[in-house]
Amino acid sequence: MGPADVRFNYTRIASLIEPGSTVLDLGCGDGELLDLLRRERNTKGRGVEIGEEEIRACIRKGISVFQGDLDEGLIEYSSGSYDYVILNETLQALKDPVQIIREMVRVGRRAIVNFPNFGYIVNRLQLLLRGRMPQNNELPYSWHDTPNIHFCTRRDFTALCNELGIRILETVDLRRSRRVAPWSANLTATECCFVLAGSETRRSV
Amino acid sequence: MRPSVDTWSAFLTIARMAGVGIVTPQTMMVADSSDPLILESGREFSPVRVQFETYGSLNAAASNAILLLHAFSGDAHAAGRHSADDRHPGWWDTMVGPGRSFDTDRFFVICSNVIGGCQGTTGPGDTDPETGEPYGLGFPVVTIEDMVRVQRRLVERLGIRRLHAVAGGSMGGMQALQWAVSEPDAVDRIIVLASTPRPSAQAIAFNAVGRNAIMSDERWNGGNYYGREAPARGLAIARMVGHITYLSDESMHEKFGRRLQERNSFEFDFSDQFEVESYLEYKGGTFVDRFDANSYIYLSKAIDYFDLAGKYGSLESAFGKSQNKFLVVSYTSDWLYPSYQSKEVVVSLMRLQRDVTYTELDCPFGHDSFLLETDRQTPLIGSFLEDTDGPG
């Protein structure tokens, strides 16, 4: 994982997915994750991507992709139409993260979101000791030239899910691909991955 | 002296740049009185002759054939030249040939003229065997589905049971969609460029103006003008209107701006001509030499009638039987068949959990973009035609 490509460990995501399910990957890039899921979990997948170059790469892999802007929401997708909706390393770059999370649990039976944890201790220390915005392996961009406009800590994200009435089914917290304990994760994890579902009451309606 | 490897590869490169070279149009009868074509209207019709061209060669399994579907004013001449001194190559020459989007080293590419047209396939300008006179308006009304029925017969007679792909832009894209709806098992992949599942009121309105221009030309004479002077003025005006819809504000600004033809300032005597005016005159004028006014009426009407959602109740039910793979491309500056119309197709296919890829190319050339954006379409189409099929 190079600094410019802080992609969550794909095999970790694959391990969260039941074989044979349908997957919608939001911001699917070159389709690498969908390709891996197809091979290893026998999924039927589709990507949403905005970049022309990435779309070409998806087509080359034989992966269906829809060119669309996630900031416009998921109105094209009917409720419950996918087993999983994945948002991999993209949440922090969206204009309206709340809208997309709500949409993900509407369209998917499960939503998988992973994001860099801004509460990671190195980030905190950089801000505290140097008085500068954190810039490191996990957060490689300078504050003025970054696609990331909505950073949050693990605790922030948990609070948001509670506020939205979204259930957290599972979490995987990692420090550079190694699992860390959930109780310390807000301080020790560089990456957090949440498996979410809509509220039970809404689902039964 | 034997040519070195370098010389050989240089020669190959030049051969590739040259495209498919000289091609000869062919014709085939696909319907006669013993086996007439059943039109969508229910009417039986024969005889039907089809003009077509092929590029590349059919493999032994007959599994590498691609059918190209031309747009409103197109013809069977998709690629190559008809003679060594032919100044104009086929309408999609940049996309068809060795190493191009539709790679003739790998695929057997077919393009045929549509029924109702005037470029070799039976149309209103042909002689009705029953009367010995040209059909004129006695020619049956044909639809996009009828075009596909004729193409299906051609393909079968060429010994092809299943096409690797059908591909077309604009009216050709409508035919591609229709293939997925009415012949889903006879084709694997569907490529739809700059098209729509149903033209909007705005698009129909422009066609109506074109038809009105032709019908208002007194030489049109109720469609009965063959052997006499054709309604050239009416047809030229129809083409001018049509041509405007193929361009965009930006492309016209780039191409013409407000520049005047042959002068720098206004004379205020109505002899002032903007460059765009003389361009349209030129386009209209050259069109009448190659196109029949009645075909304009028939084909534009076929476009207007096309409505997959209306005909089948919804797009989902239209595509219900299709298991094809789709590539749908729209263009940001196309206001004739804007992107939202392509998206309707894509969304309904997604609801059906079908294999569909959609991309919207950001480009300034308007509806005509699908004929011009070769460099960006080539990797898309090339990959789509040969992707590695996973189990999903």
Image (spheres, coloured by chain):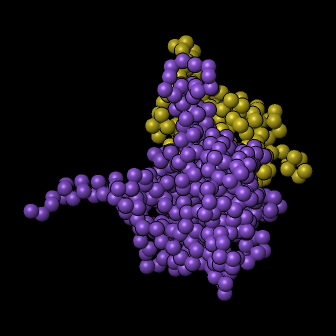
Chain colours: A yellow, B purple
Q: Nearer the viewer, residue B16 or A200?
A: B16
Measured as percent of width and height from the top left, residue B355 is found at: 63, 59
Q: Measuring 15% from the left and 58% from the top, which residue is drawn there? A: B4
Write the residue at 29% across / 54% down: B13
Q: Position of residue B106 (x, y in %)?
A: 41, 66
Q: Quadrant of residue B191?
A: bottom right
Which quarter of the rendered picture does the C terminus of chain B lie within? bottom right
Q: Pinpoint residue A38: horizontal percent, then vertical percent.
A: 57, 59
Residue A97 screen position, x and y as percent: 71, 33
Which of the 4 image quadrants contains residue B31?
A: bottom right
**In the rendered view of the protein, which quadrant contains the N terminus of chain B?**
bottom left
Count of all numbered marks drawn on residues in the image = 0
- As drawn, the residue found furthest toward the left would be B1
Query: Can you name the residue that lies furthest to the front here?
Result: B228
Q: Nearer the viewer, residue B129 or B180?
A: B129
Instruction: Give the vertical position of A17 relative to B260 (above or below).
Output: below
Splitting the image into 4 quarters, where does residue B223 fall?
bottom right
Q: Nearer the viewer, residue A162 or B7?
A: B7
Does the rendering let one see residue A45?
no
Which residue shows up at 53% across the image and 25% down it? B259
